[in-house]
Image (tube, rainbow, N blue to C red):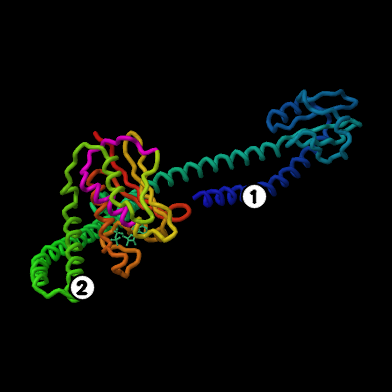
């Protein structure tokens, strides 16, 4: 719009210049002829005054029949004498001065401001045009902002959707293309939500259904003779059982269910979990400066699960030359922040957002060594969200990953 406005102003002012300049030269020639003719007449102060009042041409006469001028600020003939007779002289900006010989040896001086007037009229026109264009641009801007409001709302909704919020509904207030787009977007969100619900429900149902055959398998396993085969099968059954337990746990935590908050101190919980990893290389260290007491509304058992998961991962992914895993507590009057930092390989930047999705693993090929089904972090997120807090992952500047837990202050 600004580019359009600028080119419009340039076009109009260029057009004015192209049409006004030639006509200004013609007018100047005509006026000069007229003045030359006037100068042929005998000096007459009354006629000169009339001309000055009507045409705004100031006249000075100096000669044998006296000396007079129609305005005080006119230059004298002597001052203007430097110029060739009959030639325009620019003694002041925008003002043309002419000297012509009069009858009987006298001289006339004419002063004319036509050029300055045309210039100021032109400038005024350009300013007026600028004001019109500014008003038009402003009106168009306000109008466009209103027109694009549904698009802004949709943009906000898409951002929220990409952050994982599936409960959004964008109000559709217009019946135009934007209204149709909004309606299509809402329908898409509904369908995605239904699909995810169906997926979760399926997982839940399958996990429930698998429990009975699993129990039967465990009984049958106990009847098998001791040996390599039985040990292998027992390991597989145990793995299946832990996966099913984690899945059911994940489902139980949905929408804050299964959480029992109690006002208690977080620091002993933290120290107790850190201590339970004693002896596991490269070690766990609660950093100095941790507050003596941090009282919060917590489900202690669930927070233990979170800390255990994070420390287990941090130790599991540490490298042979990694330093100890660090646990730090800080906070402000609104929330408490617990950070678990390791010195491992870190997490690929592209995977940071997906890390808390169920079944997400950076290394897609699950092996017995690195264990896990990619459920641990999604359980952690559900637990923290049920506390009204959150969890985020980031890579540290040099090496390693950091997991930041946020818990709201009690009350
Ligand atoms: P898993 O049971 O596979 O460990 P999680 O949900 O706990 O599942 O973790 C998901 C994935 O996140 C892991 O498979 C791993 O790739 C990555 N991850 C988690 N913690 C770390 C860490 N401290 N350093 C590097 N990668 C990690």
At mark 2, the secondary structure is helix
Residue 48: give x, y in percent of width and height.
76, 28
Picture residue at 88% right of the left edge, 30% below the top: 78
The one of 124 and 85 positioned closer to us in this rendering? 124
- Residue 228 lies, with reference to residue 358, above or below; the image says below
Indicate whether residue 143 is drawn in magenta: no
Mark 2 CB within 8 Å of ligand 1: no
Q: Which residue is mark 2?
A: 232
Q: Which residue is depicted at the point 69% across and 28% down?
A: 53
Tell me the residue that label 1 is attached to: 19
Q: Label 1 to label 2, Cα distance in Å?
A: 98 Å
Q: Which stretch is magenta?
A: 289-313
Badge 1: residue crowd in 10 Å (few <14, some 14–19, many ≥20): few
Residue nearest the observer in this picture, 334 or 264: 264
Q: Is residue 304 magenta?
A: yes
Camera sees residue 216 = yes
Residue 299 coordinates in the image, percent (x, y): 20, 44
Q: Quadrant of ligand 1?
A: bottom left
Look at 33% across and 33% down and name the residue there: 333
Which percent across, then down, holds residue 247? 19, 60
Q: Is residue 359 left or right of residue 287?
A: left
């Amino acid at each position: 719009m600004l580019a359009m406005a600028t080119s419009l102003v340039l076009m109009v002012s260029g057009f004015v210049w192209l049409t006004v300049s030639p006509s200004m030269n013609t007018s100047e020639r005509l006026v000069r002829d007229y003045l030359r003719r006037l100068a042929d007449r005998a000096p007459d102060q009354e006629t000169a005054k009339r001309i000055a009042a009507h045409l705004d041409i100031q006249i000075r006469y100096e000669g044998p029949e006296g000396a007079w001028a129609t305005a005080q600020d006119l230059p004298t003939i002597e001052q203007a004498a430097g110029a060739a007779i009959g030639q325009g002289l620019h003694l002041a900006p925008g003002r043309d001065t002419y000297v012509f010989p009069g009858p009987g040896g006298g001289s006339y001086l004419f002063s004319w401001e036509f050029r300055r007037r045309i210039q100021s009229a032109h400038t005024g026109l350009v300013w007026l045009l600028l004001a019109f264009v500014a008003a038009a641009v402003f009106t168009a801007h306000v109008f466009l902002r209103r027109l694009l409001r549904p698009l802004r709302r949709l943009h906000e909704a898409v951002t929220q959707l990409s952050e994982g919020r599936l409960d959004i509904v964008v109000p559709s207030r217009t019946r135009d293309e934007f209204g149709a787009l909004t309606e299509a977007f809402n329908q898409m969100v509904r369908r995605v939500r239904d699909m995810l619900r169906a997926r979760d429900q399926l997982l839940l149902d399958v996990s429930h259904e698998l429990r009975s055959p699993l129990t039967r398998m465990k009984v049958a396993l106990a009847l098998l003779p001791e040996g390599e085969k039985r040990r292998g099968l027992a390991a597989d059954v145990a793995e299946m059982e832990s996966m099913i337990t984690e899945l059911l746990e994940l489902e139980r935590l949905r929408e804050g269910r299964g959480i029992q908050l109690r006002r208690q101190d977080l620091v002993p919980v933290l120290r107790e979990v850190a201590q339970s990893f004693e002896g596991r290389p490269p070690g766990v260290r609660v950093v100095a400066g941790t507050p003596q007491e941090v009282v919060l509304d917590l489900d202690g058992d669930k927070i233990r699960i979170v800390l255990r998961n994070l420390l287990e991962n941090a130790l599991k992914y540490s490298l042979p030359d990694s330093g100890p895993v660090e646990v730090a507590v800080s906070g402000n009057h609104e929330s408490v922040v617990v950070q678990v930092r390791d010195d491992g390989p870190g997490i690929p930047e592209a995977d940071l957002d997906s890390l808390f999705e169920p079944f997400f693993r950076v290394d897609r090929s699950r092996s017995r060594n690195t264990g896990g089904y990619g459920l641990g972090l999604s359980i952690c997120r559900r637990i923290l969200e049920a506390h009204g807090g959150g969890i985020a992952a980031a890579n540290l500047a040099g090496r390693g990953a950091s997991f930041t837990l946020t818990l709201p202050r009690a009350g």
